[in-house]
Image (spheres, rainbow, N blue to C red):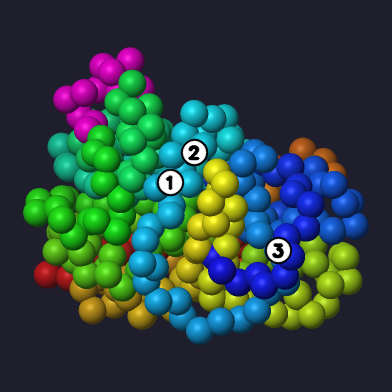
Amino acid sequence: MRVYAVARPKVARVARVSGLGFRVDQPDSSRPTPDIWHPTSDTWHPTPDTWHPTPDPAPKAHDTAPRAYEAIAANYDEQIRGDEWMRRALHRHYLSVFAPGQRVLDLGCGTGTDALVLAQRGISVVGIDGSESMIGALRAKVAAAKQEHLVTGRVLSLSELGSLDERFDGAFSSFAALSTVDLGQFARDAARLVHGRMVLHLLNRFSLWEWLGLIARRRWREAGRLRLQRVRNFRIGGHDVQHNLYFAREAYARFFADAFTLRGAYSLGALRPPHTVQRLPRGIVNGLEHLDVRLGELPGVRDAGRFFVLDLKRRA
């Protein structure tokens, strides 16, 4: 995400990405770190927080995401705990879409957390990730769970998806892995490989909770420009990783409409605050979470979450 052109402030300690709030442990309490993702470690932090709207990004000449996640692979599982509620919501969706006996593709599989949940229901999963250490952790988990017959991991970055020559009954991607790639090229590759449903969880262009944080700090200009940003850089494992930002319907219309029908689109993280917001009572957070996972399809809510989900089906 190469949207910030000012000097980097002192690095805040953040939880890491399971999602991209507005309050984290920070060196300067007057300047909350914008963390649309889900921060969970000091290895991941957004780069400077002055937004400059930019035109749609061209595909990057080299893929920094695999190297970034390779750098944090050893602590990745610990870092993503902050958004477990969101992952549970995604798992419910995946299990409602994919059936035992199907073979599905896990895009940016990380350490295999999602793949193992599906395998427990008899769904065969091929996980791909550009980080060798992530795939190594996946294989260790799979062996410990005795699920080798259902889950396989391959070291393959998302930008290399076109090298596959296989057929899958479905595909899914969690926590913005696809926000780091050329979505147009991905859509073309997916149309060739996937012959069923596809559930994609991507970073949203606008976050209500981040906007509220900016308003609370009287950073009016940045709050006003928040919806305009198209790319954004995040510091992950010592690497600046560019993320491309869209709204749900925009992403579908631009990249997927030709080959896929839209079964549903909804937000996650619009109403329920990120775990970095620590001042709300647990009962209120639980109530907002209950509403978040039920109202995300409403037009006013769908474009306000930290993430959105597209549920797609390959056209016949």
Give left or right: position of 273 versus 218: left
Question: What residue is drawn where x is 17% and y is 25%?
Answer: 149
Judging depth in this view, the residue of 107 and 147 nearest the camera is: 107
* Residue 272 location (% of width, % of height): 67, 52
Label 1 and label 3: CA atoms lie apart by 21 Å
Give left or right: position of 286 versus 86: right
Judging depth in this view, the residue of 308 and 241 nearest the camera is: 241
Residues in magenta, as a range: 141-152
Mark earlier in primary sequence (2, 3): 3
Which residue type does callout 1 highlight? Arg
Question: Where does label 2 land, which residue?
Answer: 71
Q: Label 1 neighbourhood size at 10 Å, few (<14), some (14-19), many (20+)?
A: some
The disc placed on residue 48 is 3
Magenta region includes residue 143: yes
Question: What residue is drawn where x is 40% and y is 47%?
Answer: 66
* Above or below 248: residue 309: above
Q: Are marks 1 and 3 in contact (CB under 8 Å)?
A: no
The disc placed on residue 119 is none
Give left or right: position of 30 versus 180: right
